[in-house]
Every structure is written in structure tokens, then in C-alpha cells.
Image (spheres, helix red, strand yellow):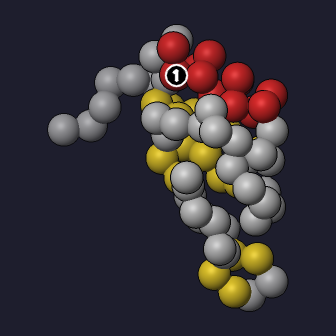
Amino acid sequence: MPSSRPKILFVGLQGSPHVARWIKMLDDLGFEIHFFPVDAGPWHYGLSNLTLHIPKFEGKSSQLKKR
């Protein structure tokens, strides 16, 4: 059954505290969050409750891991 929550795709740096705050705010407002990180850096500890879309960097699978 499809979700009735509005969906949003958020593109950003997964290590940014600003991105983590925006995603938390949107989640609190009832959005279904999809996240597309733009680099392979470390994750911000506040990122949660989202669907991750993993990009490929330079022809290789990304090494992204959520802590």
C-alpha cells in the first residue's frame, strides 16, 4: 500500500549538521524523506528515518555506510 505521506528527495552532504537538521524538521512535519548524498564522506550522527539512494562515484560503487 503506497504511503499517504508527501515525499521529498533531499540532496546534500551527509556529514553536514545543517542537512541533518533540515531532514529532521521535514520528518517531524510528516514527510517521507529520500536522501541522495553528494560525496562519500562520513555521516552526521543525526541522520535517521530516511530512504537512502546510493550514488556511484567515478564509476565505482560508493563506500557509504550509515553508522
Residue 12 lies in quadrant: top right
Q: Position of residue 43 (x, y in %)?
A: 69, 50
Q: Looking at this view, name the residue that lies furthest to the top.
A: 29
Q: Is residue 9 above or below residue 64?
A: above
Please state the total of marks drawn on the protein image.
1
Q: Is residue 41 above or below residue 23?
A: below
**Horizontal placement of 9 versus 28: left or right?**
right
Q: Is residue 65 above or below residue 10?
A: below
The front one of 44 and 36 is 44
* Neighbourhood count class around disc 1 (C-alpha, 10 Å): few under 14, some 14–19, many 20 upward: some
Q: Looking at this view, name the residue that lies furthest to the bottom.
A: 59
Residue lying at 63% horizontally and 66% vertically, measured from the top left: 64
Residue lying at 27% horizontally and 37% vertically, measured from the top left: 2
Q: Position of residue 38 (x, y in %)?
A: 78, 57
Q: Position of residue 65 (x, y in %)?
A: 58, 63
Question: Quick check: can you spot residue 11?
Answer: no
Q: Looking at this view, name the residue that lies furthest to the left.
A: 1
Residue 56 lies in quadrant: bottom right
Residue lying at 46% horizontally and 35% vertically, measured from the top left: 49
Residue lying at 51% horizontally and 14% vertically, measured from the top left: 28
Q: Position of residue 42 (x, y in %)?
A: 74, 56
Q: Callout 1, which amino acid?
A: Asp
Question: Quick check: can you spot residue 39?
Answer: yes
The front one of 15 and 56 is 15
Q: Quadrant of the N terminus?
A: top left
Residue at the spot of label 1: 27
Secondary element under disc 1, as helix, strand or loop, is helix
